Amino acid sequence: MLNFERVKIKHEDPERRLKSFTLEPLLEYTNEEGTAEASRCIGCNICTQACPAGLDIGGYVRSTAIGDPAETVRIVFENLPFPAIIGRVCTHMCEDICVLYDDGGPIAIRHLKRFAADQFPDYSKVVALPKRGFINKKVAIIGAGPTGLSLAYYLLIQGVQVAIYEALPVLGGFMKTGIPRYRLPQETLDKEIGFIVSQGAEIHLNTKVGKDVKFEDIISKFDAVYLGIGNHDPRMTGTPGSNTKGMYH
C-alpha cells in the first residue's frame, strides 16, 4: 500500500552545529529511509516539467526506490554532472508541483539525489564513460563555474580537447566562493569538480583573460570559445546602513 506521509528529513543537533560552521543542518537518509521515501512516488513524472536541467526525475526516483543508487547517479549524469551538489543547493521547483504536495508532502526529490550521490566517493566506478582518445577539436572555456565545468565534462567525454581559464585560484566559481560550507561541503565540491577535471581538462588558474592572456590569442588557438564568466556582484538591499563597513552581501 502506498504511504502518503513523507519520510522526515532529520536535522543535525543544534548544539553540535553551534560548535562547527561546516556541519550540514540536514542529515542523510538511511538506506531504509531513502528507499521508503522514493517508494512514495506514483510515477506521474510531472516533476520533470519543472526541472530547468530536464532531469529524468521519475527515472532516478524509481531506481532509488528499488535500491539502485548507482543507476540514480547515472541517470542524473545524463543531463548534469553535479548530483551531490545539486542534491544540496537546488531550489527544487520540481517538489513544488509534486502531486503529493497536499497529501503527505512532496517527494523529497532533492534529498534523494544527495542520498544516492553521497554513497559513491568515486564516480569513476559508477559512471561508465566511453573509451576514446581526443579528436582534433579544441574548445576554450573562460570561467570555471557550474556552466563552464558542465560544458567541459560533456565535451571531454565526446573526445573534444578542453582548456579552462579561471581568474580565481580555485575551480567552482560561485559554488566555491559564495555558498557557505554548511550548505555545500568542501569534500562534495572536490569530489564532483575533481571527477570532471579527471576526464582530461587543461586547467589555467589565476588567469584573467584580457590581462594575463589575450582574448585574441585564445580565439586564434581554439575552434570555439565559451564565455561562462558569471556574475559575482552582490544583490544590494538598498536599505539604510546596508553599505556599512563589515556588512557582507
Image (cartoon, rainbow, N blue to C red):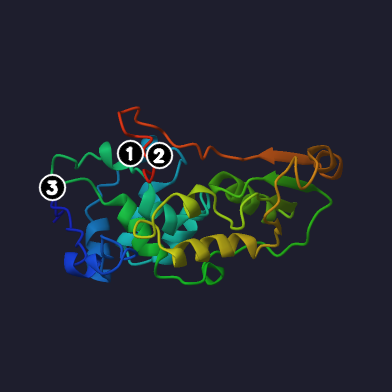
Q: Which mark is residue 93?
A: 1
* Tag 2 secondary structure: loop
Question: Residue visible at 73% across and 52% down?
Answer: 162
Q: Which mark is residue 51?
A: 2
Residue 127, x across and y down, in percent: 54, 64
Of tags 1 and 3, the one toward the viewer is 1
- Could you say which is closer to the camera, residue 240 or residue 139? 240
Left or right, residue 128 beside residue 32: right
Check the picture and name the quadrant holding the C terminus. top left
- Could you say which is closer to the camera, residue 141 or residue 124? 141
Is residue 97 shown above or below 5?
above
Question: Residue visible at 78% across and 62% down?
Answer: 133
Residue type, label 2: Cys
Task: Specify which label sits upstream in the sequence, 1 or 3.
Answer: 1
Residue type, label 3: Gly
Is residue 92 shown above or below 27?
above
Residue 21, x across and y down, in percent: 32, 63
- Could you say which is closer to the camera, residue 9 or residue 54? 9
